[in-house]
Image: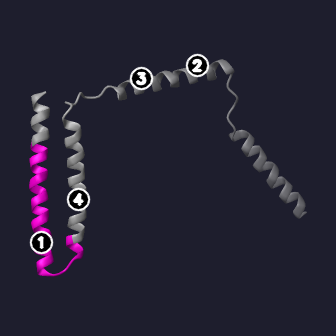
């Protein structure tokens, strides 16, 4: 009797799976769907390719700004981890100098972009 219950349960699971499976689509319809997706992807790719024109001197400035920001992050972490008045004062001075340098670089970058 236990065997019948198992097989009945298996059959119902198989039937449920058969009902859930998607019907097969005709090859022409599939081809049309694939073509539409490819066309949509091309449109998206064209949109991505169009970028704002950046003046030639901005790229190196962006790199320097990124490096400075990363250094500032590292120094603030170091300052948070360190203890001692002299160490904190030294790190604070270095952080202030870097922030001043960062402000100058961003101002220079903005001026280059405005000149465009």
Q: Nearer the viewer, mark 3 or mark 1?
A: 1
- Please name the residue that numbered disc 4 is placed on: 71
Res 5 label:
none
Residue appearing at x 42%, y 23% in the figure: 43
Q: Mark 2 and mark 1: span between their CA atoms?
A: 67 Å
Q: Mark 3 and mark 1: span between their CA atoms?
A: 54 Å
- Please name the residue that numbered disc 1 is placed on: 90
Where residue 44 sits, quadrant-wise, is top left
Residue appearing at x 9%, y 36% in the figure: 111
Residue appearing at x 55%, y 20% in the figure: 35
Callout 3: helix, strand or loop?
A: helix
Dot 2 or dot 4, earlier in sequence? 2
Counting other residues with Cα less than 10 Å from the Cα at mark 1, is it few (<14), some (14-19), or many (20 or more)?
few
- Tell me where the magenta segment starts and ends, as one range: 79-107
The correct choice, above or below, for 64 with respect to 116 in the image is: below
Callout 2: helix, strand or loop?
A: helix
Q: Are marks 2 and 1 in contact (CB under 8 Å)?
A: no
Dot 4 or dot 1, earlier in sequence? 4
The correct choice, above or below, for 41 with respect to 20 in the image is: above
The correct choice, above or below, for 23 with respect to 101 in the image is: above
Where residue 17 sits, quadrant-wise, is top right
The N terminus lies in quadrant: bottom right
- Please name the residue that numbered disc 2 is placed on: 32
Callout 4: helix, strand or loop?
A: helix
* Residue 77, magenta (yes or no): no
- Please name the residue that numbered disc 3 is placed on: 43
Image x and y of residue 15, in percent: 77, 44
Q: Mark 4 and mark 1: span between their CA atoms?
A: 15 Å
Q: Are marks 2 and 3 in contact (CB under 8 Å)?
A: no
Q: Are marks 4 and 1 in contact (CB under 8 Å)?
A: no
Q: Mark 2 and mark 4: span between their CA atoms?
A: 53 Å
């Amino acid at each position: 009797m236990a065997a019948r219950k198992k097989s009945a349960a298996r059959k119902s699971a198989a039937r449920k799976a058969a009902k859930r499976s998607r019907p097969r689509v005709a090859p022409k319809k599939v081809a049309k769907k694939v073509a539409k997706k490819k066309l949509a992807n091309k449109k998206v790719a064209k949109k991505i390719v169009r970028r704002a024109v950046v003046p030639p001197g901005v790229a190196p400035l962006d790199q320097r700004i990124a490096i400075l920001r990363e250094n500032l992050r590292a120094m603030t972490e170091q300052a948070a981890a360190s203890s001692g008045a002299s160490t904190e004062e030294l790190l604070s001075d270095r952080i202030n100098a870097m922030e001043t340098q960062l402000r100058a670089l961003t101002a220079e970058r903005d001026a280059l972009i405005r000149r465009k």
